[in-house]
Image: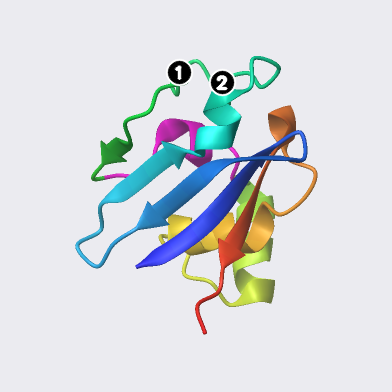
Amino acid sequence: MRRAKVHCRGVFAGVLSKDQAGTYRFQYAPEYLSSPKCPAISLSFPKQEGRFESPLLFPFFFGLLAEGEDKALQCRVLKIDESDHFTRLLRTCEAETVGGVTIKEVVST
């Protein structure tokens, strides 16, 4: 399973993962949920204790990815398959994304 920490304006918000079967999951961190100062990361991800699941990368996260020539350039330089959206997200969304949401891969040792 591949996992990534999701931050909203620098605050750890939750974990996004993709399992071997290709199912995507997002779950808010308990401390993020309990803070009234922390907003939902998106209207499509209201703050809730349960996890969100999808067979496709959630549209909110897909929307953070570059398109067109920028996508082609990123994939060529980083040697990423253009159809591997999760890897693109992990490799290109660590800083300066739309809406202040950033993604950082959790590397297992």
Q: Main secondary structure of the magenta part?
A: loop
The span shown in magenta is 56-65
Residue 17, quarter of the rendered image: bottom left
Is 23 on the left or on the right of 18, as rendered?
left
Is 57 on the left or on the right of 19, as rendered?
right
Q: Which mark is residue 40?
A: 2
Task: Residue at the far left: name it.
Answer: 21
> Dot 1 corresponds to which residue?
46
73 relative to 30, above or below: below
Is 18 on the left or on the right of 14, as rendered?
left
Q: Can the viewer see residue 57 in this picture?
A: no
Residue 73 x/y as whole percent = 68, 63
3 and 86: which one is in front?
A: 3
58 and 9: which one is in front?
A: 9
- Say which label, 1 or 2, has the lower sequence index: 2
At a point 44% along the width and 20% down the height, the residue shown is: 44
Q: Secondary structure at mark 2?
A: loop
Residue 30 x/y as whole percent = 50, 35
Question: Within 10 angstroms of label 2, few (less than 14), some, or many (20 or more) residues?
Answer: some
Residue 65 x/y as whole percent = 59, 45
Magenta span contains residue 86: no
81 and 54: which one is in front?
A: 54
Q: Can the viewer see residue 86 in this picture?
A: yes
- Label 1, label 2: how far apart the Cα atoms are: 5 Å
Residue 56 x/y as whole percent = 30, 44
At a point 29% along the width and 62% down the height, the residue shown is: 19
Looking at the rendered structure, the kind of residue marked 2 is Ala
At a point 63% along the width and 18% down the height, the residue shown is: 39
Looking at the rendered structure, the kind of residue marked 1 is Pro
Whether residues under marks 1 and 2 lie with C-beta atoms below 8 angstroms apart, the answer is yes
